[in-house]
Amino acid sequence: MLAGLLLVAFSAREAVSAVSPLLGQIGAVLPFDAVTTGILAMLPTAGFAVMGFLALPLLRRVQLEYLVLVAVLLTTFGQVGRAVGWNVVVFLVFTCVAMLGIGLINVVAPPLLMKYFPDRIGVLAALHVTLLGVSTAVAAQCAIPLESRFGWRFSIGIWAALSGFAALPWLILLVTGRTVARSRTSPVNTKASPPANGVKPWRSSIGWGTALVFAGCSSNTFAALTWLPVVLVDRGMSQESAGSMLALYSILALPVALVVPMVVVRMSRPLPVAVLFVVAFAAGYGGIIFAPSTTAAVWVVIAGLGQGAYSFAFTMINKRTRTQFGSGSLSAFAQGTGYALASVGPLLFALLHSPGDGWLPSFGMLGAWLVVLVAGAVMVNKPRMLEDHSPVPKQAPGEALF
């Protein structure tokens, strides 16, 4: 189970970051314009949102392990399909399929951690988010070198092999039936199951606050994952160097991912952590826009540290719930709503730009999403549990939360 969770995390983001460094090469074969490029940029958050909304009824009816396997297969199929895509529409459709798979992984991961490792939430959340950052950075860094040797189709399609490999532990677990045996002894499953409609995160400030945090951080992160190389090339950087800057931006999610979950689970009111990431985003953007391009790496580093907001949001799902069902419900609602809101961020980033404006309107829009992030962090700051607002069993006296 642990190997399966970690392999899924390691293979979950290459499909997002492998394309943006190659937009020029892909555009030479497939006629992307500003609108279709904007649509491509918003597909990750849009796909994550759709699967977030679909996941809640699925969580009630389908075993978590089967959902993970389906998610991995969708991601694999989507990456293979777009690598052989013969026109823009096909490329976008298969990209959407891959993003739906990643979106399902995003939703299912927190309840799986709650189900199998309820006493190790902080450590395993840190590992999960860290490996997401590794996968993002590896694909971004390798995109141009792989394209130079084998072409852009190979460069974006090779990561399907890693996704396919991540399916193996889940196939083994499901074929042998070991997940059923383990779930019968899981600490979480010894609790009474809540009614199917017992936990309603859309009626709680916890649900909406977590959704706004996801919206704020995701609109910023995915806009950067798509447009950062384009911005830097526009400012005079070579395409390969811009791809390396994207890899640097992505890899900076690692140090914060390792630390943030373990810090957040120990803080009753973790608002200051979220504010630090907002400041990092804002300062980094200011430097990227106004500072000399020779110092771009410094500002990319600062903005990259702001990605810790995702670790904050991911950890808050299990910090503000105490049951597997509550975790799944909050994960589905917060990510579905948050990513739906965030999907306009990468699209607007493209539409707001015009030649000669220095990308200032585009980054100003991202600054507005940072305000949304802070608002959401304020809403989830108060120490309380989602289940306390729903007719589900209360925690037994003296029972540990994490």
Image (tube, grey):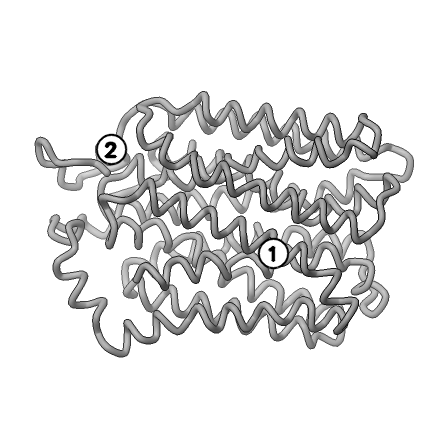
Pick whichever, 179 or 391, lies toward us. Answer: 179
Q: Position of residue 18 (x, y in %)?
A: 66, 59
Q: Which mark is residue 306?
A: none
Query: Which residue in the structure is indicated by mark 1?
Result: 138
**What residue lies at 75% left-to-right and 60% top-to-bottom?**
144
Which amino acid, mark 2? His
Of the image marks 1 and 2, the number of the one nearer the N terminus: 1
Query: Which residue in the structure is indicated by mark 2?
Result: 389
Q: Position of residue 62 (x, y in %)?
A: 29, 65
Q: Secondary structure at mark 2?
A: helix
Image quarter of residue 391: top left
Which amino acid, mark 1? Val
Q: Position of residue 290 (x, y in %)?
A: 81, 26
**Other residues around mark 2 within 10 Å, as few (<14) / some (14–19) / many (≥20):** some
Pick whichever, 56 or 261, lies toward us. Answer: 261
Q: Secondary structure at mark 1?
A: helix
Disc 1 and disc 2: Cα gap in Å? 42 Å
**Other residues around mark 1 within 10 Å, as few (<14) / some (14–19) / many (≥20):** some
Q: Is residue 335 left or right of residue 30?
A: left
**What residue lies at 72% left-to-right and 32% top-to-bottom?**
363
Residue most extreme to the left = 397
Image quarter of residue 400: top left
**What residue lies at 56% left-to-right and 66% top-to-bottom?**
97
